[in-house]
Image (tube, rainbow, N blue to C red):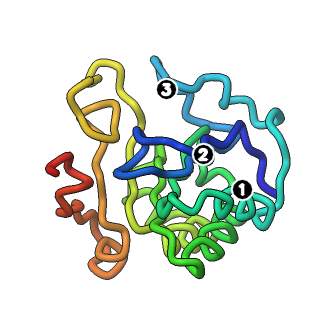
Amino acid sequence: MLKLAGIVGDSIVDGPGLRTTIFAQGCPHHCEGCHNPETWNMTGGTELEPEAVMEIVTANPLCRGVTFSGGEPFAQAKEFARLGRLLKEKGYEVASYSGYTIEELLHGTRDQRMLLETIDVLIDGRFELSQRSLELNFRGSTNQRVLNVPESLKQGRAVNVTEPRWLGEY
């Protein structure tokens, strides 16, 4: 069962194109200046099975990308991995935000690794208010990276996305 803070069906700010953004409830990071502090509480939110979330996602035929946001999706890695597998089976591009770096996740739990294996793009790292920039695409501070997860998993290190649509080059 996923604990969610909400779902936005027509997002254009959490990745390229029209996307569905799924907000996890609960976050251990508590970054100063966080855009979603209401998601910090681990006990709030609405509980939904991944299959019920899939029904919401597939109701919009124009959406081909899904972004996990937060809160912290990797705090619910097992259930988000279930959802990620369902999305990938249906051909969706899956992206995720995380306050953890990919280096932390590569050495994290088995469930976190399973979630990574369902993700195409990871925007990693905690939001740093001192490094905030409104000029960045799909991230809030300059320390955060936009990473190609399948290639990062292959190489065992962070590999940046090179796709122009993720870099804001249209």
Q: Residue at x 58, y 40 (%)?
A: 70
Q: Residue at x 29, y 23 (%)?
A: 132
Crowd rating for badge 2 (residues with CA inside 10 Å; few <14, some 14–19, many 20+): some
Q: Residue at x 20, y 46 (%)?
A: 168
What residue sits right under mark 3 in the picture? 31
Task: From the top left corner, tell me how far across and down residue 167 is, in percent.
Answer: 20, 50
Q: Amino acid at mark 2?
A: Gly
Crowd rating for badge 3 (residues with CA inside 10 Å; few <14, some 14–19, many 20+): some
Q: Is residue 56 above or below residue 130?
A: below
Q: Residue at x 45, y 17 (%)?
A: 33
What residue sits right under mark 1 in the picture? 56
Q: Is residue 152 above or below residue 9?
A: below
- Tell me, yes or no, whether the two marked residues, 2 and 1, touch with CB atoms within 8 Å: yes
Q: Is residue 155 or residue 66 the one in the foreground?
A: 66
Is label 3 in a helix, a strand or a loop?
Answer: loop
**Mark 3 or 1, nearer chain start:** 3
Task: From the top left corner, tell me how far across and down residue 156 is, in percent.
Answer: 31, 75
Quarter placement of the N terminus: bottom right
